[in-house]
């Protein structure tokens, strides 16, 4: 019984083909579900907290004036004049809350996302991103809601400083005053966080598949802008309701979310639910571009620094 011995050329060709196939498999694995590496919860949590905190502060500082205009537009009634002074009112106090809130949000989102991606089928990655965004939003709401209440009260001129705002809100309305509109905040921010993160992650996956590489900084910014603008437009009515409930203070003009919606539609018309949509879409679109670009860049820097330290120790 004889067998044909393959030529050296055919052996080399076979090795080359296997190498290409291996690289291709590795590429698609990295796009869809990531390479099978041990899950380091603490490292992912740490990186998420640092990157989220940096990104949150950058966005808030750059776009605070647009947010102030948006808030004043939403609060104005019967064609009231919008004051354009003091557009940075309350920024410093707000950053005290934005830093830990953004750190908690991404710090919880990243490990939750990775755990869900490992647990769910590959074709349900959008579900993992959506659920992780909602969970991150719930965790950060403990800090984000009081920060938002103080910020918006200062933006419309009720208080001059964050410490005064906190002291007077607690004095006049009790501690629960710092969580005014908490239900409407969750109604707006949980779907917002979930939708924005889901859209961004899915756009990023699609871009990787099309370009066969990771997006660079300008491309991350572009994807973040698209995700932010779409989400901002869709959730504007929820934002209007949240703003009205947060700034009403002890006046109790609205009794709750449903009453707020009914009253706005009855007194001002349905279009009032979309007040401030222009500044909001601009603010969140540009904010999304800055946030996700800074987020990805910070994660890259942290990973490079860790790799450099590991090589030095060797």
Image (cartoon, rainbow, N blue to C red):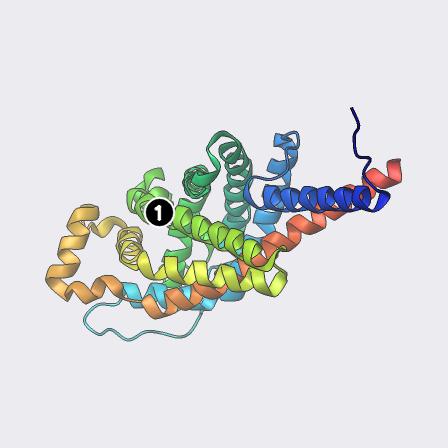
Query: Residue 99, image x and y in percent?
Result: 55, 48
Query: Residue 288, image x and y in percent?
Result: 49, 59
Q: Quadrant of the N terminus?
A: top right
- Would residue 19 be found to the left or right of residue 78 on screen? right
Q: Quadrant of the C terminus?
A: top right
Q: Which residue is drawn at 79% across and 44% down?
A: 10
Q: Is residue 171 above or below residue 218?
A: above
Q: Is residue 58 visible?
A: no
Taking depth in this image into account, of 210 and 220 the one nearest to the observer is 210
Taking depth in this image into account, of 14 and 215 the one nearest to the observer is 14
Query: Residue 44, image x and y in percent?
Result: 62, 37
Q: Which residue is drawn at 26% across and 64% down?
A: 274
Circle 1 packing at 10 Å, graded few (<14), some (14-19), many (20+), is many
Give the labeled residue for mark 1: 191
Q: Which residue is drawn at 39% across and 75% down?
A: 84
- Please count the marks in the image: 1
Q: Is residue 81 visible?
A: yes
């Amino acid at each position: 019984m004889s067998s044909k011995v393959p030529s050296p050329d055919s052996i080399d060709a076979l090795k080359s083909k296997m190498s290409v196939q291996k690289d291709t498999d590795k590429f698609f694995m990295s796009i869809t579900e990531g390479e099978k590496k041990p899950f380091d919860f603490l490292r992912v949590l740490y990186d998420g907290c640092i990157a989220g905190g940096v990104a949150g502060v950058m966005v808030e500082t750059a776009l605070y004036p647009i947010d102030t205009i948006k808030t004043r537009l939403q609060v104005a009634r019967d064609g009231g004049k919008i004051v354009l002074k003091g557009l940075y009112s309350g920024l410093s106090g707000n950053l005290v809350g934005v830093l830990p809130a953004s750190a908690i949000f991404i710090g919880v989102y990243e490990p939750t996302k990775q755990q869900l991606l490992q647990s769910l089928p590959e074709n349900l990655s959008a579900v993992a991103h959506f659920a992780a965004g909602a969970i991150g939003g719930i965790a950060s709401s403990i800090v984000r809601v009081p920060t938002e209440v103080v910020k918006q009260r200062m933006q419309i001129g009720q208080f001059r400083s964050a410490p005064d705002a906190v002291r007077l809100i607690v004095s006049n309305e009790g501690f629960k005053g710092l969580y005014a509109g908490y239900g409407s905040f969750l109604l707006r921010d949980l779907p917002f966080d979930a939708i924005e993160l889901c859209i961004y992650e899915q756009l990023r996956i699609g871009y990787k598949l099309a370009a066969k590489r990771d997006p660079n900084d300008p491309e991350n910014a572009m994807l973040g802008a698209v995700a932010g603008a779409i989400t901002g437009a869709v959730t504007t009515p929820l934002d209007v309701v949240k703003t009205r409930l947060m700034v009403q203070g002890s006046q109790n003009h609205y009794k709750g979310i449903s009453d707020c919606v009914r009253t706005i539609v009855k007194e001002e018309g349905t279009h009032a639910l979309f007040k401030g949509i222009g500044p909001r879409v601009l603010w969140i679109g540009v904010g999304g571009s800055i946030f996700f670009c800074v987020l990805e860049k910070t994660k890259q820097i942290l990973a490079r620094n860790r790799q450099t330290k590991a090589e030095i120790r060797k």
